[in-house]
Image (cartoon, rainbow, N blue to C red):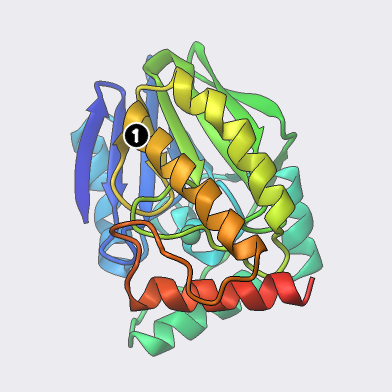
Amino acid sequence: MRAVSVHPDVLVITSRMWQTNAVALRAGDESMLVDSPYFPDELEALPGLLAGAGFEPDALLATHADFDHLLGRLAFPGLALGLGEPSVARIHREPGAAQRTLREHDEEWYVERPAPLALGQVQGLPVPGSVEVGSEELELHPADGHTEDGLAVMARWCGVLCAGDYLSGVEIPMISPGGSLAAYRATLARLAPLVDAADTVVPGHGAPNGRDGARRILDEDVTYLDGLERGEERPALPKGRDGREQRKIHERNLDVIRSA
Ligand SMILES: [Zn+2]
């Protein structure tokens, strides 16, 4: 687990698993934690690490209802988890899915947890909408397409956009069952002006990028989606995202759009 300060009020914590990012955002004496690291030792160390840096979260927020973004309560069992209303609807439609998928990945990697995942009290938030942190406002923007749900978090006071599972420098666009190509494109179009207004863009997986870097990834993603839409079996993948695992994601993307 790595912690990088991208702004005096923003700490990005990157998990060893899939470079998954959790982001602590502070305004005055209040903090919000967006998403979560994966491994039990990382979750156990998180409260101490954040407190040491002056971030003690008052609330948790997840960008979408994929299991790897929902683990905040394993570190902060006393806090409620905020989710966009589409994510709450998804969880109700697929009860236990996040817990089941987490168990499957834990089994694959021989990960043992002190306690199973319990989402506890979930707070549904309208998207688009906003939530208060101290004297500031976090904007919640719809970000579906990767999955059927999803939101991006814009913290204008510190110039940081938490994009959820978009604009990653390590992962090509992933269209999960429930997501869609059209919705993915619409989300990229919605994210573009937010990227332009941001200093730092933190993707769900992979290193934070400056505005120009994120803009380049966005353009690469649009090009990739064009090839996907044409049904290309072996499109040229963006540099740094062209390995074997990314090819597998492309195969799965083709399956999803063909069965849509
Ligand atoms: Zn993810």
Whether residue 21 appears in this view of the structure is yes
Indicate the position of residue 178 as horizontal and vertical percent values. Answer: 73, 65
**Left or right: 251, with 91 as reference point:** left
Is residue 121 placed above or below 99 in the rendered structure?
above
Q: Residue at x 49, y 11 (%)?
A: 135
For the N terminus, the quadrant is bottom left
Q: Residue 12: which quarter of the image?
A: top left
- Residue 236 locus on image (x, y percent): 42, 64
Residue 85 versus residue 229 in the image, above or below: above
The spot of residue 217 in percent (x, y) is 41, 43
Q: Residue at position x 45%, y 60% from top?
A: 172
Element under label 1?
loop
Please determine whether, in this image, residue 229 is positioned above or below residue 25: below
Looking at the rendered structure, the number of numbered marks drawn on it comes to 1
Q: Residue at x 35, y 82 (%)?
A: 112
Res 34 visible: no
Image position of 95 (left or right of 193): right
Looking at the picture, which amino acid does disc 1 mark?
Glu
| Position of residue 70 measured from the top left corner of the image (x, y, whole percent) | 52, 57
Corner quadrant of residue 96: bottom right
Is the C terminus in the top left, top right, bottom left or bottom right quadrant? bottom right
The furthest residue to the top: 135
| Nearer the observer, 40 or 97 | 97
